[in-house]
Image (tube, rainbow, N blue to C red):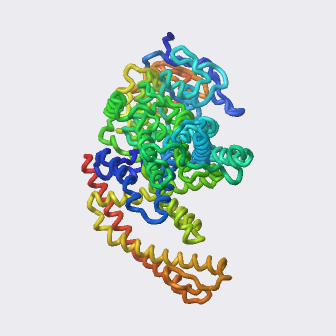
Amino acid sequence: MAGSTTSVTTSSMKFTPLNLGRWLVWSLFAILLIIAPLVFNKGASLSLLCQMGTVMIFGLSYNMLLGQGGMLSFGHAVYSGLGAFFAIHAMNLASAGTLPIPVTLIPLVGGVFGMLFGVLFGYVTTKKSGTTFSMITLGIVELVFACSLMFPDFFGGEGGISTNRVMGKPVFGITYGPQIQVYYLIAFWLFISTVGMYAFTQTPLGRIINAVRDNPERVEFIGYDTQWVRYLTLILSAFFAGISGGLSAINFEIVTAENVSAVRSGAILLFTFIGGVGFFFGPLIGAVVGVFLTVLLSDFTKAWQLYLGVFFIIIVMYAPGGIASILMMNVRLMVYRRFGKVAPRLALMVAATLVACVGAVMIIEMLYHFTLDSANGSTMSLFGATVDTAAPGGWMIALALVAAGALLFWRGKPAFRRAWDEANLEIEEVIRKEHA
Amino acid sequence: MSAYAVELNNVRKSFGKSEIIRGATLQVPKGERYAIIGPNGAGKSTLFNLISGRFGVTSGDILLNGRSIVGLKPFEINRQGLSRSFQITNIFHRLTVYENLRCAVLWSLGYKYSFWHRLNGLRDAHERAEAVLEQIGLRRRRNTAAGLLTYAEQRALEIGITIAGGADVILLDEPTAGMSRSESDNAVELIRRVTKGKTLLMVEHDMSVVFGLADKIAVVVYGEVIACDTPANIRGNAKVQEAYLGGHAPAEVDA
């Protein structure tokens, strides 16, 4: 979705690379959604894709607050989670025959209830902005989480509420029994929601919330009540969060108190930031990376949270625009035909980083094995090789890799910097001439 | 309707124990250009903040077109047709120049909090933003992020945002502060152009700007308006000379 960046970001971010028609971009997005399960058809990849889809909607809705409105919420899972609870109860009522609503429209139930709680809680949280807003959202999410354990009839206590998404007569042969049907349901709602949220950025309210982010005081002097602007935006954002909650209820057929927790809220903050808050499509990338790291990586290593945390810190410190901004800066180089100049040096930097990372991962994995798993013997399998954590050999190799990677990085960095800065200066010169 | 655009009646404002504005009274007739001058700390900017609703008054009354605006919020006062600029540039730095201006016209065109209009489909907002862009001479910088403009350009944009909504009472807080001579000459021309037919109230230190623009000058000293008259009379006013000019008129005033 390269052409759909919002025009509301800082200079390096404000860039529409290819003059693609909007239709082309959206068609590509639709085709991508359709063929994704055909390409990734091995093992658990379908369930991964389903999770990514729901997290994408959640992330995009979160970015309406963070990226577009400058509102750092610590409690966004309240809206998706409560939406999910109402959706799952609606499903149970539907399968009992008391509520005539098809599974296809269940996400809408989640959305409506997410929005209702947005109306309720948002009125309190958006009274203030900045740090105070963040603190109140944290208070609300703790409150809702505490309530979820106090009302087991509705929230299902520790075990949560479960359901069966296969109900009623099949419509056009769709039962939502097979996972692939659920995938296409999620893809459908993802597409609709993405279009909806993108459209929001192109409306008067969508632009004024950007103005509120940049300078709330001035907005008051051009006729707008900033609190009302934040409030309305939050309600709309809660609606889309609720849709994602409804989809996850269908996907997992279970909703627990974890769905409304601060942990879940923190996760979406992490993913969205990693993806990039400055671009509309940043959260889509964030969802892919986030689901990969949390779902896939956790199967391979106990240290996955450490990796996620370190990755997040590196992004915050060195690429605050997220993966999306790194991507777009390189796309810009390609469009202006400067990428060739930078590419060899960039490749060297990437190679150096990879070498150091392999070393660092070895050290971390060996440490974990040494301290937690040594009862089962000191040998472990690492990158396909057998390593003895009690012997110095493996440690030496790991340290050597880190050292070599780091050395290569520091030696190559100045040249890379020069090439990078030079290319970007040239591009800015070209742009200036185009405008003049 | 009142003949005055802005009226201050015995306005007082205290911050804690210190009284900053001590019974200021001033009437600005519609369509006239008034400059407020006074020594540092006299309360000129505070007066602006009171009129525009940034601060609430401690006592006294402020009327806009004959109606009291005491206790109203800044956006409510703005909706009644009063718009202000700031001494310290106050723009939307991550938005482009064009977007800054388009934001500033949306409310006055009645789009309010709409999330059902397509922004790029609003011809009137587009045309008005483009017109203001032309007026303030920043057409060349249309698609530049406001935060990347030069200081003088940002000051011009500041004025552009202030007038874009079409308010008929304009408050400018030191519009030429920190500008070079040629820049401030341009700014005077710009202000004259964009405030034609409107009521203008401005705080200004630069005497050549004051004497070039103002129909009348109000002198504020220690939170009171001690005189309000035509530039020529102010120049000869003994009270003003004593209190403000310390008996020595600056070179520009003599000239």
Inspect this view and state whether residue B250 appears.
yes
Rendered location of residue B105, percent (x, y):
41, 30
* The furthest residue to the front: A169
Q: Is residue B204 visible?
A: no
Please determine whether, in this image, residue A428 is positioned above or below residue A382. above
Q: How many marks do you count on the picture?
A: 0
Q: Which of the pair B138/B185 is nearer the observer?
A: B138
- Identify the residue shown where x is 32% and y is 72%: A344
Quarter of the image where one finds residue A32: bottom left
Residue closest to the eye, A237 or B90: A237
Residue B63 or residue A75, whichever sits in front:
A75
| Residue A428 or residue A207, whichever sits in front | A207
Name the quadrant containing residue B186: top left
Q: Residue at x 47, y 39 (%)?
A: A211
Question: Residue A275: image x %, image y %?
Answer: 47, 56
* Residue A417 in picture, x, y percent from top left: 38, 67
Q: Quadrant of residue B17?
A: top right
Q: Residue at x 72, y 49 (%)?
A: A149
